[in-house]
Amino acid sequence: MKAQKWSQMWLGYHRVSKDNKNWKVICNDFSKEDRVVNSAIAEFAKGIKGYFGAGITEDDGDVYVLEIIKDTSIANEGYSIKGEKSGVTLRASDENGVIYGVFAILRKLGARIRLEDICEKAAPSNPLRMMNHWDNMDGSIERGYSGESFFFENDDMYVDERTVDYARFMASVGINGIVINNVNVKGAATYLITDRFFDKVKELQDIFADYGIKLYLSINFAAPIELGGLEVCDPLDEGVIAWWQAKSKEVFEKLPGFGGYLVKADSEGRPGPFTYGRTQADGANMLADAVAPYGGIIIWRCFVYNCTQDWRDYKTDRARAGYDYFKDFDGEYHDNVILQIKNGPMDFQIREPISPLLGGLTKTNQLLEVQIAQEYTGHQIDLCYLIPMFKEVLDFRTYCSEENDTVADIVSGRTMGNKLAGMAAVINTGNDFNWTGNDLAAANLYGFGRLAYNTELSSEEIAREWVALTFDMDKASEDKLTDMLLKSREIYEKYTSPLGIGWMVTPHVHYGPSVDGYEYSRWGTYHRADHKGIGVDRSDKGTGYAQQYYEPNASAYNDPEKCPEELLLFFHHIPYTWKLKSGQTLIQYIYDSHFEGEAEAEQLAADWNSLKDVVDSEVFARVAERFELQVANAKEWRDQVNSYFFRKSDIADEKGRKIY
């Protein structure tokens, strides 16, 4: 393989055919000079060169034809593609539909589908499909497991060829919005909305615009103090309001086409409206009014909770916080505010219930936030394909209405008929050669984009697509790797988290086991294990969290006999002798699942080793090294968790295995 400065991931376009007949591109009612259409045609040229050794020509004769037709009956950002032996017709109503349609054609060609068999019509499930970077301007990435930032270094911005490739990757899976900087805005990042960085931000914004992507910035809620010299950042203060109005006018004039601001306030030490006795709606609406004249939006994160909780307090519950802070103000947020809500009430654990805010709010724009950076799910060391989890979230019935009541319905806009809605992911990229640290972690990057664009796709469909586009291997090997991906989330959950109990991780790092690591901390994340049982009572007899859901979910979660077993310990304190539906006692389930998970992690490593002869040698070696680390991690989890609960319960393993 020819050496590259960085991997091309699923856009490697490995050869699939000896057919090197050239193509001609005809645009009807679309200009080839349009920036997005131009990018689409350039990408098509890359694809057919890689797949077939072919090129694009202006000549007639013995050529294939890609005909691009404007069709206003197609939904915004949607496309229709239909192939025949002479080429492919692509129909779209707008430029984004054109580029998504081109990438769809290339996906088909990469899967070795014949031209005459290409047929697909698609429209985006979600209006907004966003990536959130947690990149810091010193070059580090918060919760980054793939190297340093490729946007920032030494408190400066950089735009280069890698930035262009990144935009290509994002457009290829349907992403239309990107927040480039960490939500914890401090230092130099506060100045991204000033002349100090406008030129560089504009340069980056133009590259994104070439691929149909809007650029957004995380902002510092205290910017009026830090940049403007004001004494407060109170959202109801007239001076603060005037400052944000003037600043936003400047930002949108310097950055025409700019998307808007992402805000983290009143959380984990960040300043916000609560500092001044104001509501979250007060803060969001003030900013929304400042950007409204320019078509801007405010994305307001709902990750707001008391992070100074006393572990002795059994009533205060971090899981309750989002609902408690936001539910009463449903309907009070202005039309250009979107509340960005994490998929669970805690913090991206391998298993959580769905946030009750999703569905709890029925009059407010909502954006589902998930995390593809594997903060608690293996750091992109352990294989953990997250798309099955995201599918579970999207398919969850909230019972907020008689129809269109799933999370997918809510965040698509179907439930409330709103246009500002969608999905956002905390991204897993960095400047490593392969972008995601572990080559296999790119399946989550690819998968999120594809799922956000089309929530009807299955986890298996997405996995198979990614494998086929990324690796040049035979069908049996593709099947094996796909199967590894599909099993990996369940395996990771088995050796780390029994029945909804998370947080047993090494504090701050969040990789590897530390069963009591957060048990007595101020962060409010406990398992409450004693010599009789384990779990947090969130029923009406405990923190009352279960009552934040609509019926019948509230009653099911409230009753340990009816609670879904995968969430049993999230909602209830359960005796070790409790009999599960399988017939196992709870303690035996803990032992068995951790032994099984470790054994299955070893099998994943063995399965990867069996692919050595069909995978690029450098890729194979990088991933094999990760599997060695995963197996070691799984052993540590198995032994620490089993030993901890054996010592707590003094109940032996029925199967007589070694527990320390």
Image (spheres, rainbow, N blue to C red):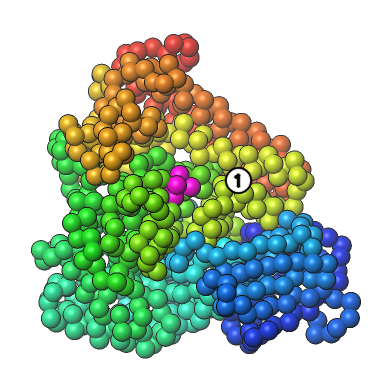
- Left or right placement of residue 58 versus residue 345 in this view: right
Q: Nearer the viewer, residue 455 or 222?
A: 455
Give the SS element for disc 1.
Answer: helix
Residue 310 x %, y %: 15, 41
Q: What residue do we see at 75% from left, 70% from top? A: 88
Q: What residue do we see at 48% from left, 56% from top? A: 428
Q: Residue furthest front?
A: 402
Q: What residue do we see at 61% from left, 39% from top? A: 484
Q: Classify 421 as above or below 391.
A: below
Residue 40 x %, y %: 64, 75
Residue 452 x %, y %: 50, 59
Which residues, given as a range, are shown in magenta?
391-395
User: For mark 1, does the 10 Å Cα neighbourhood hold few (<14), some (14 to 19), or many (20 or more) residues?
Assistant: some
| Residue with the mark numbered 1 | 460
Q: Nearer the viewer, residue 178 or 418?
A: 418
Q: What residue do we see at 68% from left, 84% from top? A: 28
